[in-house]
Image (spheres, helix red, strand yellow):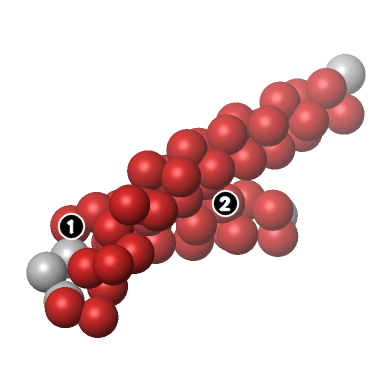
């Protein structure tokens, strides 16, 4: 459960970086794609591991 929450937080932070217009985050916009990919892959991996553990 903790892994799912962390994955969703990383994903939402990546989306926030991509959409924000705050000047303090402008230099970090290039990392938004990395956070989005990391969040999605961690979320998918967690669901796969949960599925395999239930078998």
Q: Residues within 10 Å of mark 2 (few under 14, many from 20)?
A: many
- The spot of residue 47 in percent (x, y) is 66, 32
Seen as rendered, the residue at the extreme front is: 27
For residue 19, the mark is 1
| Residue appearing at x 59%, y 58% in the figure | 5
Q: Is residue 54 visible?
A: no
| Residue appearing at x 49%, y 61% in the figure | 9
- 54 vs 2, left or right, is right
Check contact, mark 2 vs mark 1: CB within 8 A. Answer: no
* Vertical placement of residue 18 versus 40, above or below: below
- The spot of residue 50 in percent (x, y) is 77, 33
Q: Mark 2 points at which residue?
A: 7
| Residue appearing at x 69%, y 53% in the figure | 3
Q: Is residue 28 visible?
A: yes
* Vertical placement of residue 25 versus 15, above or below: below
The image quadrant that residue 26 belongs to is bottom left
Choose the circle earlier in sequence order: 2 or 1. Answer: 2
How many marks do you count on the picture? Answer: 2
Seen as rendered, the residue at the extreme left is: 21
Q: Residues within 10 Å of mark 1 (few under 14, many from 20)?
A: few
| Residue appearing at x 39%, y 62% in the figure | 13
- The spot of residue 22 in percent (x, y) is 16, 76
* Vertical placement of residue 25 versus 3, above or below: below
Quadrant where the N terminus lies? bottom right
The image quadrant that residue 20 belongs to is bottom left
Quadrant where the C terminus lies? top right
Seen as rendered, the residue at the extreme top is: 55
Q: What element carries label 1?
A: helix
* Vertical placement of residue 23 versus 55, above or below: below
How far apart are the alpha carbons under marks 2 and 1? Answer: 19 Å
């Amino acid at each position: 459960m903790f892994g799912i929450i962390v994955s969703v937080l990383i994903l939402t932070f990546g989306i926030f970086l991509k959409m924000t217009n705050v000047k303090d985050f402008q230099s970090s916009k290039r990392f938004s794609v990395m956070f989005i990919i990391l969040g999605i892959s961690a979320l998918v991996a967690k669901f796969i591991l949960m599925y395999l553990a239930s078998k």
